[in-house]
Image (spheres, rainbow, N blue to C red):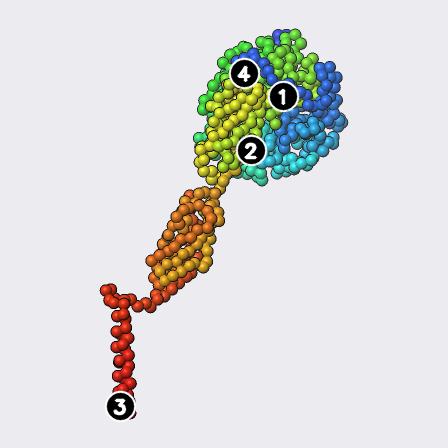
Amino acid sequence: MAPSCLWQRGRQPSRARPMKTMASPPSSRRASILTNCPVVFLLFLSFSSSAWSIGTWTFVDHNHTGPGCTVTVGLNFNSVKSAEDPVIAGYDGNLYVAWSEPDDAAPVSKHHIRVKKYTVSDGAWSWVDGGGVNGLNFDPSKEARRPALAVYGGNLYLAWDEYLTVSARIRVRRYDGDSTWTAVDGGEGLNHFTGGGDAADVTLSVIAGELYAAWDERNQVPGSEDPFRQIRVKKYNGATWTFVDHDHTGALCIQPGINQNFLKHGFRPRLIERNGAPYVVWAEEYGASNIQQLRAKCYGCDTAGTWTPVDGGGDTGLNYNTGTHANLPSLGVLNNIVYLAWYEGVEPPYNTGLPNVYLKSYNGSWNAIDGGQLDGGLDYGSLTFAVNPELLSHNHVLYVVWDEENDTTTYIPQIRVKKYNGSGFSSMDGGGTTGLNHNTGVTSNNPSLCVLNDNLYVVWEEGAPKQLRVKKLGLPSAGLAPDAALTELNLDSRSITVTLANTTFADATLSSVNFTLSNAPSGLTVENVSYTDSQHCQLNLAYDGTDLDADVTDLGLTIAGSELADGDPVTASNVLSIAATIETIPTVTTTDPPSVTATSATVAGNVTSDGNATVTERGIEYKKSTDGTYTRVAADTGGTGAYSVTITGLTASTAYNARAYAINEEGTATGDVIDFTTTPTAVTFRQAAGSRAADWRVPLMILALLGLMAVTVFVLRK
C-alpha cells in the first residue's frame, strides 16, 4: 500500500516517494493546506520578544552593496534554473554548500548534485564539483536529490538519493580536495536492496567516532507484496559500511528496519548523538487512517546492539495530538539534552487544518518547552504558516531557523531565526515582519544552517527560479591570550587576556567565580579578574605548584551568562597549552680515582642535573667486591654540583666497589662503579708504657752477644 501524504521540506513530490493527493483547499488558509503536500507549517513556541542586539547579518553569496542592491543571482550553476534542497557545512576552515539543480537536458531535465566552496579568507566562491554541467551524479542521466553533508575523520562526506531505472539509491562520496570526490558507497549505494529498495531522505551524523547514515527505503523491490518503507541505519568506520538496524545476512535479506511497526511506512529519519549513542527520530504511520506519529529510538542505550524505544514504545508516538499527522523532525543537542522540533496538525481524512511546529526536550523523558500551546510562539502572525524548522547547537545556545509567511495579506515566506539558551527564546533576525530575505517581496524556503569560525551561516532558496542565498552573523565569542607562554614553572605569575566579540560585559564588576577554567591541572585557579573595557578583561592565575605529569593542551574558559550583556554563557573559541616540567631522576657521575688509605677512602661525585626536582640527598655507596649489598654514606648537603665523601672503617688490603648516588622525588640515580683497594698495614715498633727512653738498647745487646757466641762455637769446631 502507498503511504499517505508525505510532507517534504518545501519540495514537490518525487517519483521516488509515492504521495497521496489532498483535497482542493477551501478559501480559508487556516482550514486547509495546499494540494500535493507542499505545505507550510507554523511553529508555536513560548518565546520572548527580545531581539538580537549585537551583530549584523551580511550576505556572502555575492557582493551585496546595500538595501538597493539589484543583484538577483545567487549561487546557482544556472541562474535560470531553480536550486533546491540546500545544505551547508563548515570544513577545513571554509564553507561548503550542496544542493540539487536541474540541467538543460532535453526532453526532460534531470537534477544534479552541485557543491560550491566559500573561502573565508578572501570571500570567494568556487566550484568543487568540477564546475561542469553534470555535477556529482553517478549517472548524469538520472535524477539526484536531497543531499546531506557531514565532516568525519578529517574529510567532508556528501550523500544523496539518485534515481536508478525504477527506484533510488543512497550514494556517498568523500571530498579529497579541489574537485575530487571519491565514491565510498561500495559502488552500489547503501541500500538494503541494491536492486530496488527505492531509498530516499538520507541523513548523516558522526557518532562515537563513526559516520552514521539513516534513510527510509521500501522493504522490497517495487511491485512486491510488502513495499513498506523501513528506516535503515548504517555506520562507516572509514573503510566499511555496516548495517546496524538488524542482523543483515545477505542480499536477499528482507528483515525490516527499526520501524515501530514494520507493516507501516516510516519517513525522513534524523540522527543525532547523545552520550555516545545514536538517537533516531522519524515519522511513521499508525492505525487505519495511517496517521503519522513521531517515533524515537536509541541504539545501545539499554542493551548493546539493540534499538530501544524512547518515545514510550506504544502504538502512538511523540505527537501532541495523536489524531493529527506529525512529520519533518529536526534534532539538536544542547548541554547533553536532546531537542526535537516537528510539525503536526493536519487532520485526516482530507488532510485539512493548520499545522503547527512543536518543540520538546529529552533528558531521560520528553518534556515540552513550548508549553504545549496551540497558539502564539515562534510565528509572527497567528494566521501565517511557518515551515521547515532546523535546529543547531553551538556554544551553549540552540539556534532555530525556519521560513514563515510575513502576514495574512501577501503570505510571502521569510527566513526567520531565533535562539534558545536553555530557559527562553529570543529573536535573531530583527523581530519585525520580514526576515533575512534578499528580497522580502518574494518567497524564501528551506533554510539550512551551520556555524563556522563563530559565525552563523544560513542558506536558503529564494524567488522564481529559486536562487540560493547565504547570510552570516557573527556570534558571541571569546578569545584567550596569555601574557607569556604558560609553563608549569611560571603559572603562578601569569595572566590571560580575554577578548569578547559580538557581545560585551554586562558591567565593570567581574567575579572570578563566573570564569571557569576547563581541563585545568590540579592547583590552578582564577585568583581574580580585572576589568579592562566592555570587551576585554584580564584573568590572573594562581597555582599551588602541584606537579604536572604531562603537558596540558586544551585549557579552556567558560564565562557565565550573568557576566555578559546578552545573558548567554560563552566558552572561549581557542584553548591554551601548558608546558609541563617533566621530572626525572637526577644525573650523577663518580670521580675516579679516589684517595685511599688502609682503612679509609675519599670518593668524589658530581650531580650534573637534578631532573627538574630538588636533589634531597647525594653521597657515595660502597661495598667489598665480594659482597652484594652497598652501604650508603651521605654527603653533608643535597643539591647539584661536585661533592666528596670520606668512607671510614675499611679493611686494609681489601678490594672495594664504590659509586656516587643522588635522590629526588622521582627516585635514585647512581654513577659508574669504580674499583679501589685499601693499602697494607705498616710495621712499627712501640715503646712499652713506663719504660725509660734507653731501654730499647737491651734487646740489641742480647742479640749481639748471641751472635758472638755463635761465631766462637764455629771457630772451636774448626
Residue depicted at x 67% and y 28% = 120
Q: In terms of sequence position, does the residue under pointer 4 or pointer 3 come before the other?
A: 4
Quote the CA–CA distance across marks 1 and 3.
138 Å
**How far from the left and from the top, in percent, is residue 496?**
54, 28
Mark 4 vs mark 3: give the one in front: 3
Q: In terms of sequence position, does the residue under pointer 1 or pointer 3 come before the other?
A: 1
In-front residue for pair 645/520: 645
In-front residue for pair 672/469: 672
Marking on residue 716: 3
Marking on residue 425: 4
The amino acid marked with disc number 4 is Phe
Image quadrant in which the N terminus is located: top right
Marking on residue 50: none
Q: Which residue is the site of mark 2?
A: 484
Q: Are marks 1 and 2 in contact (CB under 8 Å)?
A: no
**How far from the left and from the top, in percent, is residue 224?**
58, 30
What kind of element bears circle 3? helix
Q: Is residue 67 above or below residue 123?
A: above
Q: How would you rate the neighbour count of disc 4 (Cα within 10 Å): few for under 14, some for 14-19, many for 20 or more?
A: many
Q: Is residue 246 above or below residue 514?
A: below
Residue depicted at x 59% and y 9% = 381
Quote the CA–CA distance across marks 2 and 4.
40 Å
The amino acid marked with disc number 2 is Ala
